[in-house]
Image (cartoon, coloured by chain):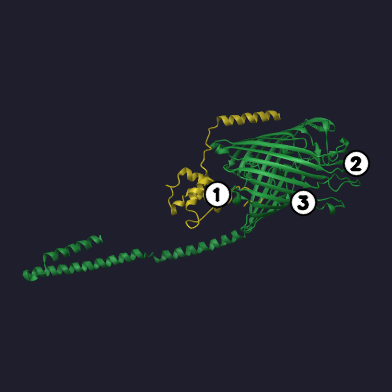
Chain colours: A yellow, B green
């Protein structure tokens, strides 16, 4: 009985892989973009330095939804929509309430 | 408009000055005309004066705009009110010293046993569907910038509060009875980052459960210090952490040494005279250059003076020997952004038993990994284990990027890990002396917050407990044909 369940499970999984519409893994590297694009200005002396943990994920969502950056500076020419999406994902993935890595001596 | 008027007036003035040159003596003007001109001049001068005043007024307005007094008053009141509210929120925020989080997992599983050896006979058996809950409370407090507390209280129990009865000798494979039932402290430790140095001290009940690569199937990130094959279980001790990132340029490079002591109350307990079991650990781990989200992990530990087999009234040694364990773990979470993750672990243990054992009868002594029945009390033994697996993130956005994974591990006859199990797993597949296979599918429901997993673990034993701490089995006596198939479905929610 258990073996049949297992076989069925594997079969369904293979079926799912074969027939589902594929998306893409080719997402931009959010961290690298964050460092290169955001880091240009948000370094000491210019604009306030900040890290993803500055806000919780819902606050980052709101930040992008309301395009809050535009109120201070329009960066649409420097950062494309795709890049902004990748940066947003990175910030949310590492937000204050995100699932952080844990190990001894790790901040 | 104003400027145009001024220009116009100036133009008129210039026109008149040109029309009536300075040598007025030579020009004859009708008196009436002259009076009209002078009147017109007066009018224009007045107009010019008026325009100047208007222009000056406008300039003053531009340089110092003034809002209506009532609006300013309303704004001031609003700001004061908001400031008062923020003070309340800030005070509460400062007093909220502990951040709380939680995890709840409900699991349903079937377990099918074949060829279990009972009373000298091999039997088959299976369970009905077993339901269980696992609940965790996660704690974190940033006491200062350099002192951080983290903890986890856990609870695990089958529905209805019934637990499976298992013998102590099998706790190496089956769930540790201590971890069932009541809420218990799974981890509670302080990280103290020595200011201005790359050094940190960690002490308390350490983060040593659910280690890499278990984050693959648990749909999460790294959650422990050691690798899963190396140590999985509650571990009290002190760790010295030295960050090597600045010196080596290797991201997250860290060297650690750890000291732990187990069973230190035995000398005071019922007059039992035993050496305390001490543990020393050294470990280095880092992200591999050029491989984002990778982990290279190396570790070594030594168990000093392991607890011997004891029977009241019968002579036994104060300890049964030492054991060394070496492990290496390599992990890539998402190879070249393809969605494919891979890990591989290798563990090796080296047992140094004492040649003195517990006297069970005339000429018959039992010691760690040795059995005088076979005439090999004190014989050194080595074991090893390999553990590898793949995890693929399916590129299906509409299904929130589900994952499939496969894991395989093998333990040789004398492989003896210091691990119990992942809380909630019925068996510790990494403690097997044989082969184990696991296949699973993870369906995210809410990103990193809720997921379902369906899977199966198949374990094929070559040996059944061939090497108890208190003795080993040899030959046919140790061999086993037992298999266990566990199929499960679980839902996990984090908040």
- Label 1 to label 3, Cα distance in Å? 41 Å
What is the crowding at mark 1: few (fewer than 14 residues within 10 Å), some, or many (at least 20)?
many
Q: Both on one chain, marks 1 and 3?
A: no
Q: Which residue is mark 1?
A: A57
Q: Both on one chain, marks 2 and 3?
A: yes
Q: Secondary structure at mark 1?
A: helix
Where is residue B441 drawn, in percent x and y? 63, 35
What is the crowding at mark 2: few (fewer than 14 residues within 10 Å), some, or many (at least 20)?
some
Q: Secondary structure at mark 3?
A: strand
Query: Is A19 on the left or on the right of B420, as rendered?
Result: left
Q: Would you say residue B151 is visible in this rendering? A: yes
Q: How many marks?
A: 3
Q: Which residue is mark 3?
A: B261
Q: Is residue B463 above or below residue B38?
A: above
Residue at the image point whose x is 27% and y is 68% from the top: B53
Q: Is residue B237 above or below residue B486?
A: below
Q: Nearer the viewer, residue B40 or A94?
A: A94
Residue lying farthest to the right in this orientation = B362
Where is residue B202 drawn, in percent x and y? 68, 53
Q: Chain of mark 1?
A: A
Q: Chain of mark 3?
A: B
Q: Which residue is mark 2?
A: B360
Residue lying farthest to the front in this orientation = B247
Q: Nearer the viewer, residue B272 or B166?
A: B272
Marked residue nearer the N-terminal end (2 or 3): 3
Q: Secondary structure at mark 2?
A: strand
């Amino acid at each position: 009985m258990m073996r049949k369940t297992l076989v069925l499970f594997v079969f369904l999984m293979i079926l799912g892989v074969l027939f589902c519409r594929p998306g893409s893994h080719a997402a931009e590297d959010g961290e690298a973009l964050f460092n290169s694009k955001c880091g240009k200005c948000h370094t000491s002396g210019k604009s306030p330095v900040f890290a993803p943990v500055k806000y919780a994920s819902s606050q980052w969502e709101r930040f992008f939804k309301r395009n809050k950056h535009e109120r201070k500076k329009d960066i649409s020419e420097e950062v494309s929509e795709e890049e902004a999406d990748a940066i947003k994902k990175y910030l949310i993935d590492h937000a204050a309430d995100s699932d952080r890595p844990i190990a001894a001596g790790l901040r | 408009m104003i400027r145009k008027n001024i220009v116009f007036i100036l133009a008129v003035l210039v026109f008149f000055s040109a029309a009536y040159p300075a040598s007025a003596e030579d020009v004859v003007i009708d008196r009436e005309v002259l009076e009209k001109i002078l009147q017109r001049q007066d009018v224009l001068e007045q107009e010019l004066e008026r325009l100047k005043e208007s222009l000056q007024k406008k300039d003053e307005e531009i340089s110092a705009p003034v809002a209506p007094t009532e609006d300013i008053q309303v704004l001031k009141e609003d700001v004061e009110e908001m400031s008062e509210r923020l003070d309340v929120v800030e005070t509460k925020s400062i007093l909220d010293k502990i951040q709380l989080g939680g995890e709840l997992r409900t699991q349903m599983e079937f377990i099918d046993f074949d060829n279990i050896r009972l009373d000298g006979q091999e039997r088959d058996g299976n369970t009905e569907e077993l339901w269980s809950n696992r609940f965790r409370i996660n704690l974190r407090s940033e006491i200062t910038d350099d002192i951080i507390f983290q903890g986890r209280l856990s609870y695990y129990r089958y529905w209805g509060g019934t637990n499976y009865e298992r013998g102590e000798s099998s706790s190496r494979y089956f769930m540790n009875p201590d971890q069932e039932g009541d809420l218990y402290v799974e981890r509670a430790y302080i990280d103290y980052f020595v200011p201005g140095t790359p050094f940190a001290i960690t002490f308390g009940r350490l983060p040593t459960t659910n280690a890499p690569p278990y984050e693959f199937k648990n749909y999460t990130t790294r959650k422990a210090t050691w690798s899963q094959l190396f140590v999985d279980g509650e571990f009290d001790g002190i760790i010295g952490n030295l960050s090597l990132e600045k010196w080596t340029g290797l991201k997250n490079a860290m060297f650690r040494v750890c000291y732990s002591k187990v069973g230190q109350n035995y000398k005071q307990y019922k007059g039992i005279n035993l050496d305390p079991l001490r543990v020393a650990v050294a470990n280095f781990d880092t992200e591999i250059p050029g491989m984002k989200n990778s982990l290279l992990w190396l570790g070594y530990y030594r168990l000093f003076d392991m607890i011997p087999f004891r029977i009241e009234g019968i002579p036994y040694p104060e300890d049964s020997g030492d054991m060394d364990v070496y492990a290496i773990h390599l992990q890539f979470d998402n190879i070249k952004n393809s969605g494919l993750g891979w890990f591989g672990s290798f563990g090796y243990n080296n047992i140094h038993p004492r040649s003195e054992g517990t006297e069970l009868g005339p000429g018959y002594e039992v010691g760690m990994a040795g059995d005088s029945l076979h005439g090999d009390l004190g014989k050194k033994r080595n074991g090893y284990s390999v553990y590898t697996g793949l995890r693929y993130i399916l590129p299906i956005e509409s299904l929130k990027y589900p994952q499939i994974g496969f894991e395989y591990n093998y333990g040789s006859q004398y492989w003896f890990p210091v691990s119990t199990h992942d809380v909630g797993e019925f068996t510790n597949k990494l403690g097997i002396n044989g082969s184990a296979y696991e296949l699973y599918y993870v369906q995210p429901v809410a990103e990193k917050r809720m997921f379902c997993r369906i899977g199966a673990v198949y374990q094929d034993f070559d040996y059944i407990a061939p090497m108890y701490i208190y003795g080993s089995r040899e030959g046919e006596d140790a061999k086993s044909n037992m298999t266990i198939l566990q199929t499960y479905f679980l839902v996990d929610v984090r908040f």
